[in-house]
Amino acid sequence: MSYQNKTYVIFDGDNDMWAYAYMKGWKSNENMDFNFYDAHDIRPLTERASEETVRKALRERLANARQTIVLVGENTKNLYRFVRWEIEISQKRDLPIIVVNLNGSRQLDANRCPAILRDWLAAHVEFKAKIIQHALDNFPDEYTRLRESTSGPRYYTDEVYRKLGL
């Protein structure tokens, strides 16, 4: 039910905006089965906004989110000012986190994934619309069931990818 629950997307705004734009494009493409309720649609920001204004708006967006996607690119693990802060808030709010590897990896990529997510109960998927949609639709319930007894990265099997045509 990803279209009903707001999804907060965390990404490197300098280098990985293209991936976020792809997700928005997939969502608007009526020929694709991809949908998410984007928390970034709440209170848009201007490029000239102060850091305090940005943090306030991001907090508001996160307060309305029910799940988080972290787009992991080449530099994501080194970003602390906003990316790490957003991840920490997601963790404190106990939101299900889906880690999307922009390099095609289907599991934890320790060379790119932020350290605070490496042992966290999060689904790790490749950057493909079908598996991201599958994770949005299924991982929040799995997270709710497992969060008290399990930690560490979760992956979807090759069989799941095959069934999705990937």
Image (spheres, helix red, strand yellow):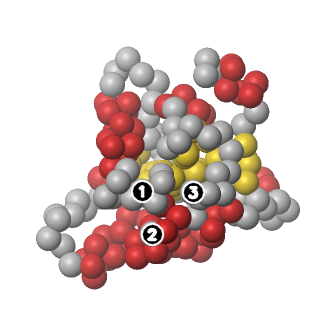
Q: CA distance from mark 3 to mark 2?
A: 11 Å
In the depicted view, which residue is nearer to us: 148 or 107? 107
Q: CA distance from mark 1 to mark 2?
A: 9 Å
Q: Residues within 10 Å of mark 2 (few under 14, many from 20)?
A: few
Mark seen at residue 103: none
Marks 3 and 1, the one that precedes in the sequence:
1
Q: Amino acid at mark 1?
A: Phe
Mark seen at residue 112: 3
In the depicted view, which residue is nearer to us: 38 or 88? 88
Q: Residue at x 40, y 71 (%)?
A: 82
> In the image, is 95 to the left or to the right of 151?
left
Foreground label between 1 and 2: 2
> In the image, is 77 to the left or to the right of 27?
right
Q: Verify CB contact (< 8 Å) between mark 1 and mark 2.
A: no
Q: SS at mark 3?
A: loop
Mark seen at residue 79: 2
User: In which image quadrant can residue 138 be found?
Assistant: top right
Which residue is tagged 1? 11
